[in-house]
Image (spheres, rainbow, N blue to C red):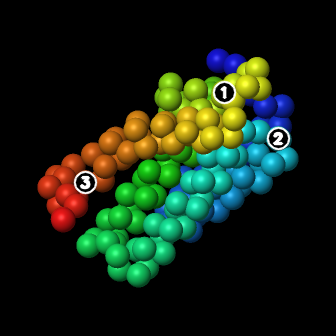
Amino acid sequence: MAPRPPLPLDRLEEPETIGEAVHNIEKVIGWAIKADSHIGYSAALYKRVTLVIRKAIDKGVFDDGPRMGELDVAFARRYFNALNAYFYPDDCRGLTFPWEVAFVGDQDGQAIILQHMMAGLNAHITFDSGITVLAIAANTLDTLAVER
């Protein structure tokens, strides 16, 4: 694994609510600014998406808002667990290869902002989403279908 930034990110608590998830994401963004770390690019995008999901839940856009909230928080936990495992590998588990790639990023400084963001999106959406949905809605997957 590549070396971590010299300024470590404080360990993130597992959120119980979307508000707590947003608070953690804000911590990541603040740290990334101080540390001059590309990890903040995905965090900034993730914050925007999380706020939109919370607003949609509050407006009743989803058929099952509480389950969507539970899914959102569980999804966020995977992200925070991966960050904790990256910065505290001796104490925390959960750093999967997709997240390691996203966090390590480009060591030669050649990646553009979009590539950093896409690495985070790839880890979170294509890897974490299926695991999270299975954990939250394994017995009700048929009710997650989008009606057209």
Say which label, 3 or 1, has the lower sequence index. 1
Nearest to viewer (mark 2 / mark 3):
2
Q: CA distance from mark 3 to mark 1?
A: 32 Å
Disc 1 marks which amino acid? Val
Disc 3 marks which amino acid? Ala
Q: Which residue is mark 1?
A: 104
Residue shown at 73% from the left, 25% from the top: 110
Residue shown at 76% from the left, 20% from the top: 108
Residue 133 visible to the viewer: yes
- Residue 53 pos. (x, y %): 46, 67
Q: Decide if residue 7 is on the left or right side of residue 104.
A: right
Q: Identify the disc placed on residue 137.
A: 3
Nearest to viewer (mark 3 / mark 1):
1
- Residue 97 pos. (x, y %): 50, 25
Q: Identify the disc placed on residue 85.
A: none
Rendered image quadrant of residue 112: top right
Q: Decide if residue 142 is on the left or right side of residue 58.
A: left
Q: Which residue is mark 2?
A: 36
Q: Work out which quarter of the rendered image holds the N terminus and state it.
A: top right
Residue 48 to residue 92: above or below = below
Residue 91 visible to the viewer: no
- Residue 18 pos. (x, y %): 51, 65
